[in-house]
Image: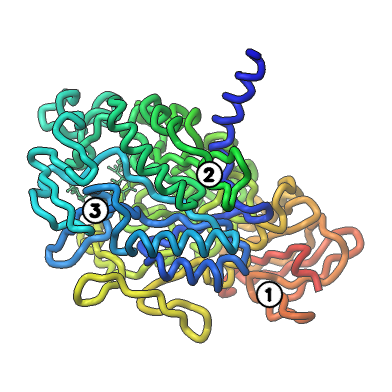
Amino acid sequence: MRVFLLLVAFELSWAQYNPNTKPGRTSIVHLFEWRWADIALECERYLAPNGFGGVQISPPNENLVITNPWRPWWERYQPISYKLCSRSGNENEFKDMVTRCNNVGVYIYVDAVVNHMCGAAAGSGTHSTCGSYFNSETHDFPAVPYSGWDFNDWKCKTGSGEIENYGDPYQVRDCRLVSLLDLALEKDYVRSKVAEYMNHLIDIGVAGFRIDASKHMWPGDMKAFLDKLKNLSTTWFAEGTRPFIFQEVIDLGGEAIKASDYYGNGRVTEFKYGAKLGTVIRKWSGEKMAYLKNWGEGWGFMPSDKAVVFVDNHDNQRGHGAGGSAILTFWDSRQYKMAVGFMLAHPYGFTRVMSSFRWPRYFENGKDINDWVGPPSNGDGSTKSVTINPDTTCGNDWVCEHRWRQIRNMVIFRNVVDGQPFTNWWDNNSNQVAFGRGNKGFIVFNNDDWNMSETLQTGLPAGTYCDVISGQKEGNGCSGIKIQVNGDGTAYFQISNSAEDPFVAIHVDAKL
Ligand code: AAO
């Protein structure tokens, strides 16, 4: 009996690390600020046919409406209630999205903002996305309901009530993050309200959660509300499936709170990944791609099976959060494609692709003063829909990095090589590197300032392969460069340093 109980406990906690994506689908995409109606369409018309496993969505719950005079993207990180209405849509549209995406095997991961409510200076009124009344001075959120008792103010020991020092874990967990009213998650009432919200989403059919600002919650308090979560809906998932949990904890080293404090609850965001990869691809600080030979744990990252990895996220692509100017984004498209290509080819971590909107980036003294600008919107503040151009790119200022050929084809590459070991590493001791994934795929980069011309062991069966970066296999043809793999597995690669994309990727599903 004892052994059995232990096994059950192990099963339950273990399962929260599993992304629950369909077999053979290995990445999710963050469709930042997209409307639910557009996500439903994207699942059906693009994500399912191209092997994406799921979508991280922006927070779906009611939030503060900020107009000064335009609405910042970050208002969605200031909850007013757990009603499902936001700029992305209402509850019916949300349910329709989840149903339609699930029906084509693309699952939904909710950004859960449960550490706090709105900022202390939000005031009172009904300027919220469902029109619910709130009062930030009296800490009154009747639509949940939360009241003064449900916040941490009495617990915080700093003079300002704010987090003043990230070296003190008590401040980080018990005080306010940028003035956001900090929920008292030690209370069972608060835990229950959070779990009720998340269970409502599970009932609708979501597959998991990104837990915002996890660093600012005690891991034990999080465990308490996570333990209250139901298994996933059996309409789409096997009986007993636990929701996927990944916690947003920024740990670049040097602070009191470590990512490892959170491993017991689920996966954790590995912020070192994008910061380091950006530095390497930019060739800053003496870094070079040859050093990527032991990428992953060898670079001091968390264990691969705990990590969620990404090149950029919605914060650090615009100077929020952590990583600074090393972070690569769609603004640096050539290097960005290489970084995302490297991430998707490399076995480390569970991968998330970013999909952004364009904003009028404008630097003053090294800071983007338009870092607040919200999604493409109409005069009344409503979010614009994602239009699709004849060439399959997106309109209305939606960037749709996930639709860039190089990125989309590398999402497919990762699916094809899933489970294969990291093999056949080669480098020139500089910025020309190559590696394989068993006998399924091979990728070669030239990030040096000179041409590359090498014969390399690919590990692949003999034949002609279509490079999925410069083009792709189309019917029996290839719209890109063709690579000839010889009987002994070697192939000749020539990559100009001035190529549009100085990298080549081949895999067994793109064999001609
Ligand atoms: C807005 C206004 C505020 C206002 C507030 C309330 O900007 O001025 O006070 O409303 O009225 C987002 C926006 C915020 C916005 C907020 C609410 O980014 O600007 O505030 O919505 O609307 C910390 C947290 C991390 C958080 C990140 C942004 O730990 O959880 O800040 N990310 C999430 C979301 C994010 C959201 C929230 C949380 C809040 O992804 O979108 O905020 O729901 C250090 C710490 C990090 C810390 C950063 C930034 O990082 O380690 O934990 O992240 O500082 O404060 C080097 C270091 C690195 C360091 C970094 C920056 O890289 O190595 O460790 O420098 O100093």
Front disc: 3 or 1: 3
Judged left or right of residue 246, residue 466 is: right
Asked whether residue 138 appears in the rendered view, the answer is: yes
Q: Earlier in the sequence, mark 3 or mark 1?
A: 3
* Spot occupied by residue 300 in the image (x, y as percentages of width and height): 53, 34
Q: Are marks 1 and 2 in contact (CB under 8 Å)?
A: no
The alpha-carbon separation of the residues under discs 3 and 2 comes to: 26 Å
The alpha-carbon separation of the residues under discs 1 and 2 comes to: 37 Å
To which residue does mark 3 refer? Answer: 63
To which residue does mark 1 refer? Answer: 472
Asked whether residue 286 appears in the rendered view, the answer is: no
Seen at 79% across and 80% down, the residue is 476
Asked if the residue at label 1 sits under 8 Å from ligand 1, the reply is no
Could you say which quadrant of the image residue 229 lies in?
top left
Residue type pointed to by label 1:
Gln
Front disc: 1 or 2: 2
Q: Quadrant of ligand 1?
A: top left
Judged left or right of residue 137, residue 240 is: right
